[in-house]
Image (cartoon, rainbow, N blue to C red):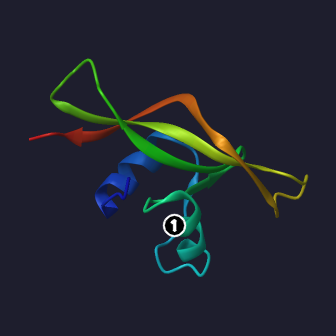
C-alpha cells in the first residue's frame, strides 16, 4: 500500500525503520518487483505495509510484510523471498 506522508510518520513512530523516498532511484525497480508501495528498510531487510482488519474498526491498521532479507553482514545487499507477514501491526489513524 502507498502511504501518505502523515501515514509514513505514524509508521516510523511505531516501527524502527527508514522509509525509502519515492524519488529514490531504486523505487521504480522495487515497484516493478513488488507493486506500488511505500518501502521501508530496517535491520531485517525490505518491508511494506498491507492493510489489515483491525478489531477496532474505527482505526485503520496495516501489518508489516517482509519482502527481502539482508544477505550480507554490512547490510548492503538484499535477497528477496516470498512475502512474510510479521507480528508488527501499525495503526495508521482514524478511518473517518
User: Image check: 58 left or right of 78?
Assistant: left
User: Image check: 6 left or right of 80?
Assistant: left
Residue 41, quarter of picture: bottom right
Question: Is 43 rendered above or below residue 30?
Answer: above
Comparing 9 with 3, the one in front is: 3
Residue 8 image point, x, y percent: 39, 56
Residue 7 image point, x, y percent: 32, 53
Comparing 56 with 17, the one in front is: 56
Count of marks, rendered view: 1
Residue 20 image point, x, y percent: 54, 66
User: Image check: 96 left or right of 7?
Assistant: left
Q: In this view, which residue lies farthest toward the right?
A: 73
Q: Residue at 58%, 49% (x, y): give it.
A: 47
Element class at badge 1: helix
Quarter containing the C terminus: top left
Q: Residue at 59%, 82% (x, y): give it.
A: 25
Q: Dot 1 surroundings within 10 Å: few (below 14), some, or many (20 or more)?
A: few
Question: Is 42 rendered above or below residue 93?
Answer: below
Q: In this view, which residue lies farthest toward the left?
A: 96
Q: Which residue is mark 1?
A: 31
Question: Is 22 rendered above or below residue 2?
Answer: below
Q: Residue at 41%, 42% (x, y): give it.
A: 50
Residue 46 image point, x, y percent: 64, 52
Q: Residue at 71%, 43% (x, y): give it.
A: 44
Amino acid at each position: 500500500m502507498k502511504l501518505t506522508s502523515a501515514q509514513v510518520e505514524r509508521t516510523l513512530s511505531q516501527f524502527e525503520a527508514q522509509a525509502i523516498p519515492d524519488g529514490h532511484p531504486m523505487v521504480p525497480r522495487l515497484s516493478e518487483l513488488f507493486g506500488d508501495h511505500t518501502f521501508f528498510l530496517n535491520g531485517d531487510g525490505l518491508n511494506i505495509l498491507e492493510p489489515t482488519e483491525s478489531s477496532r474498526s474505527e482505526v485503520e491498521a496495516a501489518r508489516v510484510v517482509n519482502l527481502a532479507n539482508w544477505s550480507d553482514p554490512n547490510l548492503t545487499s538484499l535477497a528477496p523471498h516470498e512475502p512474510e507477514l510479521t507480528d508488527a501491526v501499525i495503526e495508521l489513524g482514524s478511518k473517518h
